[in-house]
């Protein structure tokens, strides 16, 4: 009778499974280290105390917009960006508006557009395609006395209505 001789260890399945699991963990950790070293932490603020004070000033601008009853509709047209102001004091606005489209994670993709009043009563600015995805939209006059904000995905929604964000303490 012939005795069954098992194949060498490197030709069997289970040793490779046992070696592969820790090896994949090592490879994943090396890739994570590579990503951490190659990308910037754009969402981390070094001077968080000053940033907190600035947030309180921003909230005050939201309250001013609510008190004045200012609202806006933003639309991306073939000619560019169009903003129509509404509200009790919409006529008492400035000669220019500023719209900032802020990307949620990549600061280099942020866009800022200056809007000038048109003959149709709306404000117009040059912005063809902000890019895919959802953007945080900030609308303010040139004197920065009030602010409207919201989230907008231009590919999914043709227009966005911005109303004052009233923050109430809990």
Image: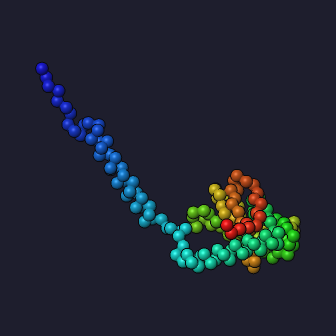
Quadrant in which the C terminus appears: bottom right
Front-most of residues 140 and 81: 140
Q: Say if residue 80 shows up in the picture.
A: yes
Q: Say if residue 100 shows up in the picture.
A: no
Residue furthest front in the image? 170
**Occupied quadrant, residue 145:** bottom right
**Occupied quadrant, residue 142:** bottom right
- Please name the residue shown 64% across and 74% down the image: 55
Q: Colour scheme in the image?
A: rainbow
- Please name the residue shown 75% across and 55% down the image: 158
Relative to 112, is 41 on the left or the right? left
Rendering coords of residue 100 (x, y %): 68, 68
Rendering coords of residue 42 (x, y %): 54, 68
Quadrant in which the N terminus appears: top left
Front-most of residues 59 and 12: 59
Rendering coords of residue 58 (x, y %): 68, 74
Residue furthest left in the image? 1
Rendering coords of residue 130 (x, y %): 67, 61
- Please name the residue shown 70% across and 52% down the image: 156
Relative to 53, is 28 on the left or the right? left
């Amino acid at each position: 009778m012939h005795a069954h001789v098992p194949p060498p260890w490197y030709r069997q399945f289970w040793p490779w499974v046992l070696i592969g699991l820790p090896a994949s963990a090592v490879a994943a950790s090396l890739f994570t280290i590579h990503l951490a070293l190659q990308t910037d932490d754009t969402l981390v603020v070094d001077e968080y105390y000053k940033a907190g004070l600035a947030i309180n000033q921003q909230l005050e601008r939201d309250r001013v917009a609510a008190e004045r009853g200012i609202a806006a509709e933003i639309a991306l047209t073939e000619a560019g960006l169009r903003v129509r102001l509404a509200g009790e004091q919409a006529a008492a606005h400035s000669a220019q508006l500023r719209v900032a489209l802020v990307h949620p994670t990549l600061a280099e993709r942020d866009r800022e557009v200056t809007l000038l009043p048109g003959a149709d009563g709306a404000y117009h600015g040059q912005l063809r395609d902000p890019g895919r995805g959802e953007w945080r939209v900030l609308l303010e006059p040139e004197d920065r006395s009030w602010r409207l904000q919201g989230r907008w995905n231009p590919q999914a929604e043709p227009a966005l209505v911005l109303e004052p964000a009233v923050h109430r303490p809990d």
